[in-house]
Image (cartoon, rainbow, N blue to C red):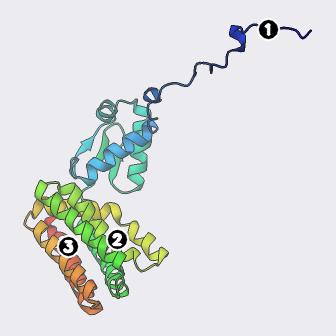
Amino acid sequence: MPAAPAPATASTSTTAPASTTAPASATAPAKQPPAAERVYQHVKQAVLERRYEGGTLLTEGELAADVGVSRTPVREALLKLEVEGLIKLYPKKGALVLPVSAQEIADVVETRLLVEEHAARKAVPATPQLIARLEELLREQKAQAEAGDLAGAATTDRCFHAEIVRSGGNAILSRLYDQLRDRQLRMGVAVMHSHPDRIAKNIAEHGEILEALRAGNADEAAAIVHRHVGWFQTLARGEAR
């Protein structure tokens, strides 16, 4: 006679065990960058946006308090910024934010003209992707100018020109141009503070460059770039601070 089936017990239940996975909302907080990197980014951004003007003396104690770190990472960050030419360290005193010099402006303008006039010619015929990107940046810069976001407008201004340079496909030339980035941003913010009427002029000239590229006129595009970038020599005549 066959044996009767065994009665069901809790151990034979098919119910899945409770999950031990933490709910999605309990994710770990994002990891902060190292302390020295936070100080470096804080000071560099403030210098580029002119919240720390040229001639400002920064102390380790103040920076440590601002960022919420000890003095050791502050010293590490300041050494890196000194190498980049943004500050000058003075032992037991602090770090002096270096003003933009007339020679620096002249050197940047000369280099930009060499690179950007060549790039404007090489960008013709312009691809639909380049035209669309320049249109997008032009709209963004207009919105930033209207909102009074001078630092943002200066960044977008620089991106507009960098897109044209990158469109040529010369990686070495693009890297050379990228090395000017910090100086361009700092000069751009300086121009917008000292010449607020220049913001609208910059946007209008970007529109002219865009139209010349759209029309396939390489000579016209290069000529507008020369006039547009060459104007920065005004700062080299003693207006940089």
Q: Residue tagged by mark 1?
A: 6
Residue with the mark numbered 2 = 162
- Around disc 2, counting alpha carbons within 10 Å, would you say few (fewer than 14), some (14 to 19), or many (20 or more)? some
First in residue order: circle 1 vs circle 3: 1
Instruction: Count neighbours of disc 1 (C-alpha within 10 A) and say few if under 14, some if 14 to 19, many if 20 or more.
Output: few
- Eye-nearest disc, 1 or 3: 1
Q: Residue furthest front?
A: 1
Q: Position of residue 17 (x, y in %)?
A: 62, 19
**Residue 220 as seen in the image, left or right of residue 165:** left
Residue shown at the point (25%, 43%) measured from the top left: 57
- Which quadrant holds residue 137? bottom left
Residue found 32% across the figure and 45% down from its top: 43
> Which residue position holds label 3?
232
Which residue is located at x 27 percent, y 70 percent?
103
Q: Where 68 sits versus 200, above or below?
A: above
- Front residue of 121/79: it is 121
Res 102 → quadrant: bottom left
Q: Is residue 56 left or right of residue 22?
A: left
| Residue beneath the point at 19% across and 82% down | 227
